[in-house]
Amino acid sequence: MNYAHLFEALMLVCFGFSWPLNVSKAYRARTAKGMSLPFIILIITGYLAGITAKIMNSQFNYVLAVYFLNLAIVMTNMFVYFRNRSLDKKAEKIKAGKIVPVAEINKNEGGNETMYNYTYSLDEVINKTSAAAEKKNGVILMGGAIDQAIPVAQLAGEYNFNFELYNKSDASLSAATAKAYFEKMIAPLAPEGLIIHLGENDVQLAKINPSAFESYYTALIQTVRSCSKNCRIALVSVDNPANDKNIAAMNAQIKALAGAEKLSYINLENAKFWHPESTKAACNFAHSMGLKTRKPLNDVAEILYSYAYHNFDTHAVQNIAG
């Protein structure tokens, strides 16, 4: 037995094992977001080079068959990419028209004219589907007005997160209402991770009665832990573009609370220095290889707030990092 050929075949099997799962997931996702055509082409080129080398050396054996098998699976992934891209384009056209035709077609009596039902807009359908599809054990963003505008689902797809990510932010959220809001809107989802961004509506409370602000915040953390003692929690600082001393004091209070409770702390003053785009290639590669690693909440927060810093309008950007 040629052990060199055996180990080469084993290497190919290990590399190719994750591709069928990737193809299945991409096909069911029905969107090309998060898929990388250049990456797929690069892998195909590599397999073609290996096959060419085998043929030139007249090595017609089972290893060559594994090369062809892997190539076929990767090619399938490329076909799925173009199919999903076509679906994305169709969805964009439908969204532009704000209509969704019902599949069933009714015909007028005595005529051939087809009648479509445009009862529901695409936005309504998406919202209904999204609400019904929410799963437990995901990571949830719980914040205010700034957080509400962050497209977490889009970013989760682009960075190939291997967990569910939901945005449960509310512009009116305050420290006083956070506990009840969590119990009603978030606790039923039993989050595995929670990114909390409170304080936008609590500047006066923290100034007049800082102990009350801390008490409300502590009550929220205790409620989260009673819901799931293993839930990871990250606290996000309050925006302070004007270097307001009251907000600075509030941030110091939040940071101290995070330290006392052994939680992660994210300082939004550093948002302008974050460039998570550089990690996207690594995320895509890990996803294509089927790696299942739990991304730290700090990394997730940097991706979300970097998007806000680099993509929101000037006013929103100033609200985040000054």
Image: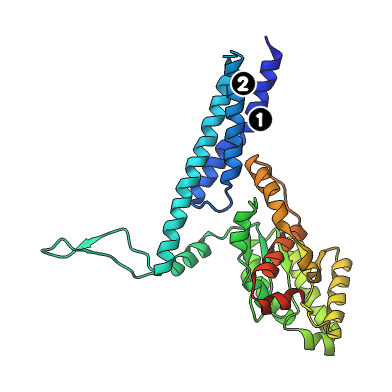
Name the side, left or right, on which 106 lies relative to 150.
left
Residue 90, percent from left and from top: 41, 57
Q: Position of residue 310 (x, y in %)?
A: 68, 67
**Which residue carries the number 2 mark?**
53
**For the residue marked with disc 2, what is the amino acid?**
Ala
Q: Residues within 10 Å of mark 1 (few under 14, many from 20)?
A: few
Q: Of tags 2 and 1, which is closer to the observer? A: 2
**Nearest the eye: 173 or 60:** 60
Residue with the most extreme left position: 110
Q: Is residue 63 found left or right of 262 in the rendered image?
A: left
Seen as rendered, the residue at the extreme top is: 1
Toward which corner of the image does residue 56 lie, by quadrant?
A: top right
Please give the name of the residue rendered at 52% of the width and 42% of the height, measured from the top-left corner: 24
**Residue denoted by label 1:** 14
Quadrant including the N terminus: top right
Q: Is residue 238 at all visible to an observer of this figure?
A: yes
Please state which of residues 14 and 214 is positioned toward the viewer in this rendering: 14
Q: Which element carries disc 2, helix, strand or loop?
A: helix
Task: Compute the Cα span from label 2 to label 1.
Answer: 20 Å
Which callout, 2 or 1, points at the residue further toward the start of the chain? 1
Q: Is residue 136 left or right of residue 262?
A: left
Kind of residue at disc 1: Cys
